[in-house]
Amino acid sequence: MTATETATETPAIETVTEAPAKKAPVAKKPARKAPAAKAAPAKKAAPKQAGDEKRTQLRTIPTSKIDRDPGQPREHFDEAALQELAKSMEKLGQLQPINVRYSEDTKRFTIIMGERRWRAAQMAGLTQMKAVVMHGVSEGRETFAMAVAENVGRADMTPVEEAKAFHKLVEADYTVDEVAELVGKSAAYVQWRIDLLNLCPEAREALVKGQLPVGLSWYVGKLSNQNQVRFLARWVRGDFKSARDAESFAQALHTEEKRQEEQGSFFVLSDEAAAARKDNGQDALPGSLDVPDDERERILADRSKLVGKIDKLGQAGEILSLLAATDPEELALLLAGTPGGIGGHRLRIKHLQDIATKAMANLRKAEMVAEVRANGLTVNPDAETAA
């Protein structure tokens, strides 16, 4: 019995020792629940977000399912250029795909880049277009920035369109420097364009139609709306000898506006002002009617001295005329070996030329300052109220 008990007890001991080893898989069951976590709703949601990821496809899509972007920076398209492109597309087809974004809601495509090609394709009767379809890109500053970057610099994009586009990007929290980097322009260029939005409607229309040079427009935009309109009338009448004279006039007018504003008044261009001053015998000293008597005396005394010096320029003119008319061989015989040599005399003339150029620019500005003051009225609201 003892042997039998020992025999029966031994397997029992073995069973006890083996049981934990065999029951180890039971302990692993909680670990097997990890796969259940893979099937959890949080991870199954990933495929739903896949459509929101940014990706592109090159596809051929129906032209009828393509819409223009209402926020497109370009507002004007040259009709003749579109006709030329349409004829080319009729013969050769579409050579470059357009860029569009796809909307899951509308099942339609909105143009990001390539509206000009789309318009021409419609004119050419193309029913399908090659397009780079962008998924996961919603309407916003990113797509608008792409459209601006593509269109800026094109010959048919007007300065006002550029100005609006740059301004919209700035409103979308881009800095001027970022916009400049985006479109490949300098920050000064971007700010210069944005400043064009200060133009009054009449001046802006003249700029769009090419009647007002873009460089001059920037100076005009600094003026008050009332003076912008009056300046534009003078420009259209041809009152200025050149665009540079017009720029100097606009600068002088802006300076006078600021000067009068600091004194509590405002300055308005008036065609009647010059005539009124002449009738009153005041045209001899335009713009200085409000100065004290002792200051007027100083101005008249300094004027006499300056005019006397300017009159001596006639002597310099005679010398220059002589040098210009003398035969070069004769000049060589006369001036070679003199102190400084011919090269030294030429440098002196060059120095005079540089000074004369600066003097001409300064006199142009002075002429426009006098013109502004002689053709404007200073209005003091406080004085009018008191009256």
Image (cartoon, rainbow, N blue to C red):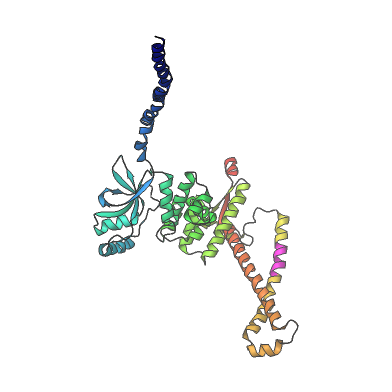
Q: Nearer the viewer, residue 187 or 9?
A: 9
* Horizontal side of residue 269 vs 47, given as left or right: right
Quadrant of residue 77 within the rendered picture? bottom left
Residue 310 x %, y % = 68, 71
Q: Nearer the viewer, residue 45 or 374?
A: 45
- Which residue is painted at 25% across and 57% down in the image? 126
| Residue 276 visible (yes or no) | no
* Horizontal side of residue 174 vs 278, given as left or right: left
Q: Nearer the viewer, residue 78 or 182?
A: 182
- 141, above or below 245, in the image: above
**Extreme-right residue of the structure:** 339
State the quadrant of the N terminus. Answer: top left
- Which residue is painted at 64% across and 74% down in the image? 353
- Which residue is painted at 68% across and 54% down in the image? 291
| Residue 295 visible (yes or no) | yes
Is residue 208 in the magenta section?
no
* Horizontal side of residue 35 vs 255, given as left or right: left
The span shown in magenta is 300-307
* Horizontal side of residue 81 vs 316, given as left or right: left
Residue 137 x %, y % = 38, 44
Residue 380 x %, y % = 59, 46
Residue 2 x %, y % = 41, 10
State the quadrant of the C terminus. Answer: top right
Secondary structure mainly formed by the magenta segment: helix
